[in-house]
Amino acid sequence: MDATLPGGERLHAVIPDVTREHWCVNIRKYIARAAHPDDLVALGSITPAAARFLTAAVAVGLNVLVSGATQAGKTTALGALAGAIPARERVITCEEVFELALPLRDVVGLQCRQPSLEGTGEIPLRRLVKEALRMRPDRLVIGEVREAESLDMLIALNAGIPGMCTLHANSARDAITKMCTLPLLAGENVSAAFVVPTVASAIDLVVHLDRDARGRRQVREIIGVPGRVEGGVVETADLYRRVDGELVRAEGYPPHPERFARAGLDLVRLLEAR
């Protein structure tokens, strides 16, 4: 059974004969510790230079995919990055259960609904994404994509609606590969010939998180997606990577430098700053 407690905690219970002998009850309580990229700096997850770049990237409307393993801090990072969304924008969030609490003025939060005991009334994440597009969003934030809803998200991003989401993956490049695979679950009429170039054009940045040897959550790498496909593989560019435990600037550049220029930002200086 999956359920939500009155305080918003997520409850998951498994009992015999699904388990061998004992009951297994898990309660997951989400505690928001970061409301802006600068808060990730205070938590030791990212460097000030990388935080300034991500703040600018979100502000100018780049599409960001936050990836990582379970408990790597993806939802926390997503909420922090969303704190850089300009206050004038209308934001629609879609989640399986409410976890995001964005510090913005105009936010509409949507949550999935489990089917009743009779098997009716279910509202899946894919339905929420479709409904969100009817609500005139300036920005779309999806808690996590796991299945066919990734196709609807890509279509929305490709239509010009900036967005962000999280995804389970072992690396930033694995996240791109997975994004090229999940939309195929939407139906047999969806092909890789459509999905791969759509991912290349819709996703701009991937922020990948993991946990170090002491269990601290950190950003391991940030890559850009220039929008090119070679041999059926989406090209990527390294922006930041961990070297000897420190997140340092790599040699790549993000897509859409013109957006930074229109906002009065010097992209080269922003990336090279320490």
Image: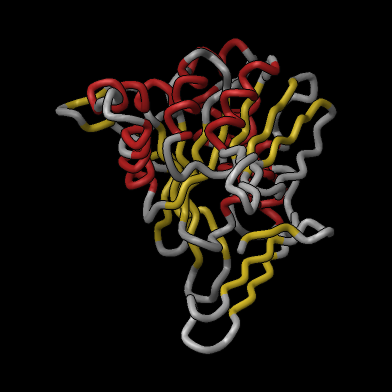
User: Which residue appears at 64% of the width and 24% of the height?
Assistant: 132
Asked whether, in this view, residue 224 is left or right of residue 101, the answer is left
User: Which residue appears at 48% of the width and 76% of the height?
Assistant: 18
**Is residue 251 shown to the viewer in this render?**
no
* Residue projecting furthest to the bottom: 21
User: Which residue appears at 53% of the width and 14% of the height?
Assistant: 160
Q: How is the image coloured?
A: secondary structure
Asked whether, in this view, residue 79 is left or right of residue 273, the answer is right
Q: Estimate the x, y position of residue 178 in percent, counting from the top left.
A: 34, 43
Please tell me whether residue 260 is drawn above or below residue 42 in the rendered image.
above
Residue 95: quadrant of the picture? top right
Q: Quadrant of the N terminus?
A: bottom right
Q: How many numbered marks are there?
A: 0
Residue 147: quadrant of the picture? top left
Residue 240 vs residue 168, the one in the foreground = 168
Q: Estimate the x, y position of residue 25 in percent, counting from the top left.
A: 64, 76
Q: Quadrant of the C terminus?
A: top right
Please tell me whether residue 194 is drawn above or below residue 78 in the rendered image.
above
**Is residue 269 shown to the viewer in this render?**
yes
Asked whether, in this view, residue 106 is left or right of residue 271, the answer is right
